[in-house]
Amino acid sequence: EAGVTQFPSHSVIEKGQTVTLRCDPISGHDNLYWYRRVMGKEIKFLLHFVKESKQDESGMPNNRFLAERTGGTYSTLKVQPAELEDSGVYFCASSQGGFGSTDTQYFGPGTRLTVL
Amino acid sequence: GEDVEQSLFLSVREGDSSVINCTYTDSSSTYLYWYKQEPGAGLQLLTYIFSNMDMKQDQRLTVLLNKKDKHLSLRIADTQTGDSAIYFCAESPNDYKLSFGAGTTVTVRA
């Protein structure tokens, strides 16, 4: 079974440009999460989808970030226009959903974004 | 708050035990987690502990939880070179989003 995949693995762009990151969750997982690790600091929650609906986007830094999840399958995270402080590693995770026992989040390898 | 703190670096000799410590702030977390990130890879769930447990053992891994002090630790017995990685402690205050620490980079030396 394929795990969570993310594309691209690395992206280097200039300040002011636009970048779109993609995440393909594990097939059948309703929950999809985006997280970000900036400058070796803690990994911070950005947002959570259940199917195609945004359940919680409280971690999104500002309105330059737009996340979508078309048809409840893959998700994109667009940064427009990118700023220097957006550099970091963006992780995607998915989980089956459910209740009671731990709902394990499976993480992708991350996209390393560098804004120059 | 949702602050999770852990030391940044740990160097251990191969064959010794490693202990990684973590403190968290939200006592409502149902589960507490340890994730491992190897170079170039994503986060792998190593183990987790339910908040009403004090200890959980899984092969070479032992997790200790002190709820009173909000302290979580991960002990790796007989540390191997393959254990070199970044280890993240995480809590889940509302049972879905994870709140992570900054990660402890463990270096295993021969």
Image: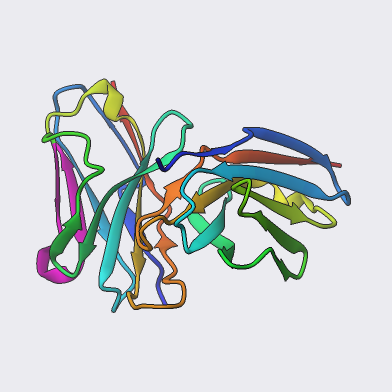
- Nearer-the-camera pick, B37 or B30: B30
Please check the rendered image and state whether residue A69 is part of the magenta-colored stretch, yes or no: yes
State left or right for residue A52 relative to residue B55. Answer: left
Query: Residue A25: percent from the left, percent from the top?
Result: 30, 66
The x and y percentages for residue A68 are 13, 55
Q: Residue at x 81, y 40 (%)?
A: B12
- What quarter of the picture does the N terminus of chain A occupy? bottom left
Residue at 43% across, 53% down: A109
Horizontally, residue B102 falls left or right of residue B56, namely: left
Whether residue B41 appears in this view of the structure is no
Q: Is residue A38 left or right of residue B16?
A: left
Count how many numbered circles sit on residues in the image. Answer: 0
Give the magenta-colored segment's residue range: A65-79
A106 and A22: which is toward the camera: A106
What secondary structure characterizes most of the magenta part? strand
- Left or right? Give the position of B22 relative to A7: right
Q: Nearer the viewer, residue B3 or A95?
A: B3
